[in-house]
């Protein structure tokens, strides 16, 4: 059985000057890795409700849900034995362009920093993100969604063994309660 979670990329600016907020994680999972705020679903919570709650808990801002755009969903598989994987996570990725409050590190983060989306520090992020994030972020505006399957190559989740992605129309996205 997998767990579901969300990740939010707050965006500010336009065109090549668009920036996203990333924070250095301080947790058992992804400790020291840069990521957007987010976390696990509570029972009976939609992805958008989870996103808004987690962003407020982790960085103290209230996301305007109308500005939140779902642009990717990824299924993560962790190796359990040679050639065998366990489906551990389904993560739904959003951007948000409007929020109230000033971002500050609260639960789960050591610090926060803005990065130009054309110059993301992939060497400090989850290893899978360099493979798909640059192609997925522009999808937020054109009615498409990237679905991913990520198979990690090691137990430490530092390498990706293989990955698959497909573009789907948001209107045909079959995972209920997300978009």
Image (cartoon, rainbow, N blue to C red):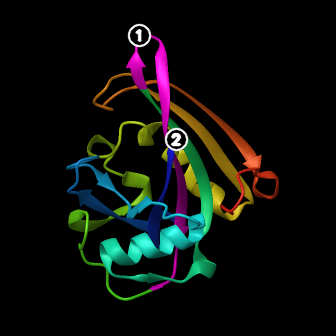
Q: Measured from the top left, where is residue 42 in percent x and y?
A: 48, 64
At mark 1, the secondary structure is: loop
Query: What residue appears at the point 33 percent right and 81 percent down from the top-left corner?
Result: 60
Left or right, 8 with reference to 145: left
Q: Residues within 10 Å of mark 1 (few under 14, many from 20)?
A: few
Q: Is residue 164 above or below residue 45?
A: above
Decide if residue 11 is in sight here.
Answer: yes
Looking at the rendered structure, the secondary structure element under dot 2 is helix
Q: Are marks 1 and 2 in contact (CB under 8 Å)?
A: no
- Above or below, 50 relative to 159: below
Where residue 63 appears, as percent x and y from the top left, is 49, 80
Q: Which part of the image, by quadrant, shows the C terminus?
A: bottom right
Magenta stretch in the rendered image: 79-99
Magenta span has 76? Answer: no
Residue 107 placement (x, y as % from top left): 25, 69
- Dot 1 or dot 2: first in sequence order is 1
Instruction: Kindly report the secondary structure that dominates the magenta region of the rendered protein.
Output: strand
The disc at residue 82 is: 1
Image position of 83 with respect to 32: above or below:
above
107 sits left or right of 18 in the view: left
Q: State the mark number for residue 132.
A: 2
**Along the line of sight, the residue nearer the viewer: 160 or 86:** 86
| Residue for point 37% across, 53% down | 119
Residue extending furthest toward the top:
82
The answer to which image quadrant residue 153 occupies is top left
**Side of 48 where 155 appears, left or right:** left
Across and down, in percent, residue 20 comes to: 41, 65
Is 90 colored magenta in this rendering? yes
């Amino acid at each position: 059985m997998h767990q579901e979670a969300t990740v939010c990329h707050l965006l500010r600016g336009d065109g090549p000057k668009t920036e996203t907020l990333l924070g250095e994680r301080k947790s058992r999972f992804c400790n020291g890795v840069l990521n957007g705020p987010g976390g696990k679903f509570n029972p009976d919570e939609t992805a958008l409700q989870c996103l808004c709650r987690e962003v407020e808990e982790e960085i103290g801002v209230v996301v305007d849900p109308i500005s939140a755009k779902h642009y990717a969903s990824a299924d993560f598989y962790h190796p359990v034995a040679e050639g065998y994987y366990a489906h551990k996570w389904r993560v739904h990725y959003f951007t948000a362009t409007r929020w109230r409050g000033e971002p500050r590190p609260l639960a789960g983060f050591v610090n926060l920093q803005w990065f130009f989306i054309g110059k993301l520090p992939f060497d400090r992020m989850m290893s899978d993100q360099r493979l798909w994030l640059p192609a997925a972020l522009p999808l937020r505006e054109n009615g498409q969604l990237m679905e991913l399957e990520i198979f990690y190559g090691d137990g430490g989740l530092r390498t990706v063994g293989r990955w698959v992605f497909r573009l789907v129309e948001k209107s045909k996205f079959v995972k209920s309660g997300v978009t």
